[in-house]
């Protein structure tokens, strides 16, 4: 037996390991299994190259729980270590790198979770660790390294065993959760699901039925293999069927709706990155869907916080990114300025734009069918990412109230003749509530205008963005004050009433209706337009909407609107202007006004019930 001291430079770091890493304790298992995978990959490579000439045999890694002995063992059939290697790798390299690591990141425990401090993380949960290892070089003896959580270790020669290593953790009394099968299974699911070497954890029992007659079934015990060593993102895209992509999605997010489509990422220069990103069904519930992308490094799960690597709008996507080139051992602010990370970000953005563009060009119909789910994503991308905007402006769609879809260019062409105002601006009319604004929509359509639907949470920002970027385009809500001025013919229409009569009618409204007098305005509109119309100043309304989106309280601002009286409508020109009885005049004007309010959805509560009661009286 050899005794020795681990090459400690400063103080004893074992208490520090335990204390500082408490929150990320569970990563010890990932670290130890990763080492087992590394050792296995090495022997596979040596065998492939003919350096290792013996039979490779079954290289399944085993995780073995022994509750009675209070041990958790990770067993591999990898390269193993000679005595010299144990000295070098465990007593010097691993120890000093663990020490360096702790020195640097003592205060950033979140990073430790991502990076891990390697072999020595075992001491977070164990007060004694044994490594029994047989090198693949047959002439070497099997050695056993023991360390009880202090700088002393022992090294014994033991009976020869098979190639590979057992790392035996004597779980400490304050970490007994790691002696629970369910806890270990949970960790294996989280960190090891896609590791490249099969990992066995105990057995599982399944009922097998011989035939339909066999009601009882037979229990069949099989190895419990916890991982899928060949995840889809490592395979060549042209060899994978759609069904496989879908079932992988289901594996990642059980019980989710199937994804719309996906992108297979694969690049090895100037950085290495593979992965599959899925477009989920989004609809309007943006927040719930965010941050579901999982980041792996060589098939080892690292984190699902990918904010720094994936542009904000792409966090709506789901799936997996695997890259050994993403530096995980550095602080967040550094990550944001890291050139590799920047390249990765723009690569992913570019791929996503390409995919959408291709889908739009090749399968426009199905693209339109998916637009409802895609639109938030594309618009969000456009308002938040300049580069994405440049690409997406060619495939972002505008939905018309009659259910047709147009690109921005197509739409400009379509409305050019009818919807260009006197300043040569193209007016994109829109509604954000098809039901509430129905009468305005149909009035606009009667005039030969087209109306878009803009009812998504992101649309306010999106419209503003388009107005800024596109030359001479303005968005105007269909019930806005600008609409009636849009086309010349409205302005040049002759009024049926004389100037004096017009003044008189306006007076009736101003005197009898409890609303700010300066809101009333007489206009000579078409006789087909309603007698009284309520419009809202486009600018003010949009300001208010933007501020509300930013979380400001808008209740202090009074709602602003205009009341337009159509002097050419028969109810105004013929009926109201000719009434003699003052009371009747007042009542009639009020009624027309209430109708306009009703049309705009502004008649509510008591006002509404009074109006209904009065209507019933009228009908009698
Ligand atoms: P890293 O894995 O980053 O090298 P670790 O602290 O996890 O750092 O491991 C230190 C070294 O110990 C490894 O590089 C490897 O040489 C050796 N080692 C650890 N576990 C095993 C194992 N199961 N089989 C063979 N060698 C191992
Ligand atoms: Mg390691």
Image (cartoon, rainbow, N blue to C red):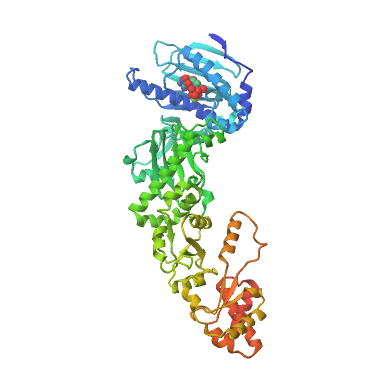
Counting every numbered tag in the picture gives 0
Rendered position, 343 above or below 432: above
Residue at the location (42% across, 69% down)? 418
Residue, far front: 423
Could you tell me if residue 150 is visible in this image?
yes
Of residue 326 and residue 518, the one placed in the foreground of this image is 518
Q: Quadrant for residue 51, please give it.
A: top left
Q: In this rendering, would 519 be left or right of 305?
A: right
Q: Position of residue 494 (x, y in %)?
A: 50, 82
Q: Residue at image x 53%, y 79%?
A: 524
Where residue 136 sits, quadrant-wise, is top left
Can you give x and y, in whole percent of width and height, for residue 486 in the image?
49, 70
Picture coordinates of residue 17, whole percent (x, y): 60, 25
Does the image show residue 588? no
As drawn, the residue found furthest toward the bottom would be: 580
- Whether 6 is drawn above or below 281: the answer is above
Q: Is residue 423 above or below residue 222?
A: below
Image check: 319 left or right of 330? left
Image quadrant occupied by the C terminus = bottom right
Choose between 359 and 609: the one closer to the eye: 359
Residue 184 percent coordinates (x, y): 52, 32
Q: Quadrant of residue 238?
A: top left
Residue at image position (38%, 41%) is 264
Residue 265, compared with residue 133, is above or below; it is below
């Amino acid at each position: 037996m050899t005794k020795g001291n681990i090459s400690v430079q400063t103080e004893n770091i074992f208490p520090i390991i335990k204390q500082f890493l408490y929150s990320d304790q569970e990563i010890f298992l990932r670290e130890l299994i990763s080492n087992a995978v590394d050792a296995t990959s090495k022997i596979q490579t040596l065998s492939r190259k003919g350096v290792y000439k013996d039979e490779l045999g079954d290289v399944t890694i085993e995780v073995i729980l022994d509750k009675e002995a209070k041990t958790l063992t990770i067993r591999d059939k990898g390269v193993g270590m000679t005595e010299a290697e144990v000295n070098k790798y465990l007593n010097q390299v691993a120890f000093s790198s663990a020490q360096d690591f702790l020195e640097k990141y003592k205060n950033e425990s979140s990073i430790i979770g991502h990076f891990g401090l390697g072999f020595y993380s075992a001491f977070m949960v164990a007060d004694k660790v044994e490594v029994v290892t047989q090198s693949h070089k047959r002439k070497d003896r099997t050695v056993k390294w023991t360390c009880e959580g202090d700088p002393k270790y022992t090294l014994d020669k033991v009976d020869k065993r098979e190639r590979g290593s057992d790392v035996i953790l004597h779980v400490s009394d304050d970490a007994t959760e790691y002696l629970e099968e369910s806890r270990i299974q949970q960790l294996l699911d989280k960190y090891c699901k896609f590791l490249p070497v099969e990992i066995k954890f105990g057995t599982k029992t399944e009922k097998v039925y011989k035939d339909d007659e066999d009601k009882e079934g037979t229990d069949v015990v099989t190895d419990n293999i916890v991982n899928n060593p060949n995840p889809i993102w490592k395979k060549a895209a042209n060899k994978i069927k759609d069904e496989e992509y879908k079932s992988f999605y289901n594996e990642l997010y059980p019980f989710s709706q199937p994804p719309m489509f996906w992108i297979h990422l694969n690049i090895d220069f100037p950085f290495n990155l593979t992965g599959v990103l899925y477009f989920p069904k989004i609809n309007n519930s943006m927040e719930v869907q965010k941050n579901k992308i999982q980041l792996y490094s060589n098939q080892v799960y690292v984190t699902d916080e990918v904010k720094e690597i994936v542009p904000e709008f792409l966090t709506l996507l789901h799936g997996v990114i695997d890259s050994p080139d993403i530096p995980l051992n550095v602080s967040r602010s550094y990550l944001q300025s890291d050139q590799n990370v920047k390249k990765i970000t723009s690569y992913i953005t570019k791929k996503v734009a390409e995919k959408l563009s291709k889908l739009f060009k090749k399968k426009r119909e199905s693209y339109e069918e998916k637009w409802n789910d895609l639109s938030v994503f594309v618009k969000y991308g456009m308002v938040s990412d300049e580069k994405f905007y440049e690409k997406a402006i060619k495939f972002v769609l505008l939905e018309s109230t009659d259910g047709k879809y147009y690109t921005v260019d197509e739409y400009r062409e379509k409305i050019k003749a009818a919807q260009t105002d006197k300043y040569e601006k193209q007016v994109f009319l829109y509604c954000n509530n098809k039901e509430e604004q129905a009468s305005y929509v149909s009035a606009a359509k009667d005039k030969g205008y087209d109306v878009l639907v803009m009812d998504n949470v992101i649309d306010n920002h999106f419209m503003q963005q388009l107005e800024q970027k596109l030359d001479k385009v303005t968005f105007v809500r269909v019930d806005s004050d600008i609409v009636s001025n849009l086309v010349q013919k409205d302005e040049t229409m002759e009024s049926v009433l004389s100037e004096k009569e017009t003044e008189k009618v306006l007076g009736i409204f101003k005197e009898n209706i409890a609303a700010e007098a300066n809101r009333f305005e007489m206009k000579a509109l078409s006789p087909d337009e309603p007698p009284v119309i309520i419009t809202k100043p486009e600018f003010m309304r949009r300001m208010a909407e933007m501020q509300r989106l930013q979380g400001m309280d808008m209740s202090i601002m009074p709602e602003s609107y205009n009341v337009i009286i159509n002097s050419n409508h028969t109810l105004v020109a013929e009926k109201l202007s000719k009434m003699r009885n003052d009371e009747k005049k007042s009542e009639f004007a009020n009624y027309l006004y209430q109708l306009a309010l009703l049309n705009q959805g502004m008649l509510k509560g008591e006002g509404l019930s009074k109006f209904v009661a009065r209507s019933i009286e009228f009908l009698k």
